Amino acid sequence: MKAIIARLAATAFAVAGLVASAHAADRVVNVYNWSDYIDNSILTDFTKETGIKVVYDVYDSNETLEAKLLAGGTGYDVVVPTATFLQRQIAAGVYQKLDKSKIPNLSNMWSEITDRAQKYDPGNDYAVDYMWGTTGIGYNIDKMKEILGTDERPSWDVLLKPEIAAKFKDCGIYMLDSPSDVLPSVLAYLGLDPDSRNPADLKRAQDVLTAVRPFIRKFDSSNYISALAQGDICLVLGYSGDIFQARSRAEEAKNNVKIGYSIPSQGAQMWFDMMAIPKDAPHVAEAHEFINYLMKPEVIAKATNFVFYANGNKASQAFVDKEIMSDPVIYPPDDMMKKLFTTTPYDNKIQKTVTRLWTTVVTGQ
C-alpha cells in the first residue's frame, strides 16, 4: 500500500510539474515600442530568466501609438509613449496605475529624471522612464567647419537665422516634422517661454520658420538618420539619440562622414520616453516583471549602450560605456541640465492653431 501511495504521489507531482511547466511556457508579455530602440539580446535574456515570451512590435510615431490606445483593445501589455503624449493619455484613462510593490528596481531610479517626469505623471504613478534625451542640432562636422570656419558646437542660429541657414542650403537641411518639438525650440531661441500658448508668441515662431523655410530641404522624423550618416544632408533639427545613431552608422560605414550633436546655448527641449501599462493589458503581472527587469542597472545600461540615449536609472551609470557617460550631449553636466526645459501637450484649441500654423510652414504657403 505504501508503494502504491508513493507511486501515486510521484505521478501527481510529475503531472503538477508538467502543468506548471506548460503554464510557464504560456506566459507572454506583448510590448509595443519605438523602432530600433532596444538591444534584442535583452529580450532573449528576459525570456531565459523568467520563462516569459516577449512579443515585440514597433512603431515610429506617438500618433500611431495614441490612435491604437484610444481605440482600445490593443492587446499590448507595455507601451512606451513620450511624456507629453503620456500626460493626455493618462487623462483619457487609457493606463492603469503601476503596482510599485512589483517593481522593486524602482529604487535604482534617478531623482533628477523622475522629478522632472512628474510634470507629466504626478507621483510617477503610471509610468517609468525608459530613455530620455534632448532635441537639438545634428551636423556634419567637416561641413560646419568649411562653411562657418569653426569647430565650436553650433547654436540655434545655424538653423533659424536666414543669413546663416542659407549657407547650408546646398548641403542640405532637415527638420523634424513635429511642431511639438520644433516650436518650443524656436521659442527658446527667441528668448520666450518654450511652453507658451500665447498666439502672439506662436506667430513669432511661425515667422522665424517661414523666413528659413526656403533653405529647408525636408521636414522628416525618421529618414534623417540615414541621410545624415550618408552625407546626403549636413544639418538637422532632431533627437539626440537619432543623431548618435547616425554618427555610429557613419563610423561603421567608414565613409569619412563625421557627425556632431549640439545642445544649443539658448536651451533645448528635454523629452522622456516612458513605459506604461494599458488599462486593458491582458498580462499585467508579466508587464510588471518586464518593467522591473529593464530597471536592473546592467540591463538598462545595455539598452543605453545600444541606442546612445541616456536613461533614467541612476544605478545603471556604473555599467554605461565610459564614452557615453563622458559625452556631455548625452549626459549633460549640471550647468547644461539647467538650460534644458520641458513642455506640456497642447489642448484641443491650441492644437488646431498649431496644426494650421505648421501646415503653413511645411507647405510654404
Image (spheres, helix red, strand yellow):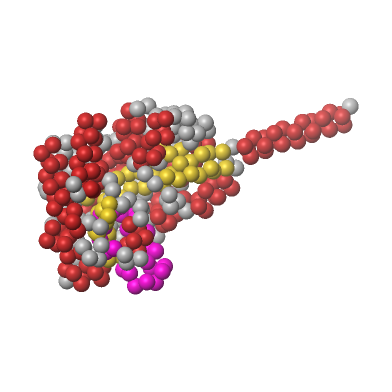
Q: Position of residue 334 (x, y in %)?
A: 23, 52
Residue 51 on the magenta span? no
Q: Position of residue 169 (x, y in %)?
A: 21, 63
Q: Residue shown at 79%/30% (left/top)?
A: 9
Q: Residue shown at 79%/33% (left/top)?
A: 11
Asked if one can make out residue 268 in the rendered structure from this viewpoint, the answer is yes
Residue 213 versus residue 140 in the image, above or below:
above
342 sits left or right of 303 in the view: left
Q: Position of residue 235 (x, y in %)?
A: 25, 61
Q: Position of residue 28 (x, y in %)?
A: 56, 38
Residue 249 versus residue 283 in the image, above or below:
below
Q: Residue shown at 22%/65% (left/top)?
A: 170
Residue 235 on the magenta span? yes
Magenta span covers which residues? 233-258
Q: Residue shown at 31%/52% (left/top)?
A: 220
Indicate the quadrant containing the N terminus: top left, top right, bottom left or bottom right: top right
Q: Toward which corner of the image does residue 63 lie, by quadrant?
A: top left
Residue 283 versus residue 217 in the image, above or below:
above
Q: Toward which corner of the image does residue 114 lie, by quadrant?
A: top left
Give 295 or 211, whichever is nearer the viewer.
211
Asked if one can make out residue 244 in the rendered structure from this viewpoint, the answer is no
